[in-house]
Image (spheres, grey):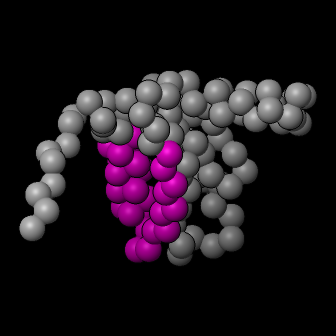
Amino acid sequence: MHKMAPYSLKLFGGIMLAEISIYPLDKGISLSKYVAEALDMIDKSGLQYRMGPMGTVIEGRLEDVYALIIRIHKRMRLKSRRVAAYIKIDDRAGRKDALSYKPASIEKRLGRKLRK
């Protein structure tokens, strides 16, 4: 039987990216009211973020990002009987400032700036 080595907390102390989209499913076609509420929570969290047209990328420590995602989900659930949550995570050891680093890395590889 293979015994798994205990994990090191150092592995989980860094900065991660999470792209999220959390919204109610029973509130009609326009959801901007709920998206604005979620973005207000993200903005007030103090974490770095970038809002996109179909989701928001948040950068921070795993515990902080997860806690924020849970708060947003619970807030949406208080307002709705059904909530959709899409969460994509990039947790890379040793990387900081990934919100800026990742786009800059691609632009460097291409040798030009990309349209925003």
Q: Measured along the vertical axis of the image, is residue 31 above or below residue 8?
A: below
Q: Measured along the vertical axis of the image, is residue 106 above or below residue 97?
A: below
Residue 114 image point, x, y percent: 87, 35
Q: Is residue 1 magenta?
A: no
Q: Please tell me which residue is depicted at 76% across the width and 35% down the height of the picture.
A: 106
Residue at the front extreme of this rendering = 1
Q: Please tell me which residue is depicted at 50% across the width and 45% down the height of the picture.
A: 90
Residue 67 image point, x, y percent: 32, 43
Q: Is residue 38 visible?
A: no
Q: How many marks?
A: 0
Q: Is residue 93 left or right of residue 53?
A: left
Q: Please tell me which residue is depicted at 48% across the width and 63% down the height of the picture.
A: 85
Residue 116 image point, x, y percent: 83, 36
Q: Please tell me which residue is depicted at 46% across the width and 68% down the height of the picture.
A: 83
Q: Is residue 86 magenta?
A: yes
Q: Quadrant of residue 97?
A: top right
Residue 35 image point, x, y percent: 59, 52
Q: Is residue 115 visible?
A: yes
Q: In the picture, which quadrant includes the N terminus? A: bottom left
Out of 31 and 45, give the one closest to the viewer: 45
Give the magenta range: 65-90
Q: Measured along the vertical axis of the image, is residue 44 above or below residue 40?
A: above
Q: Is residue 42 left or right of residue 5?
A: right
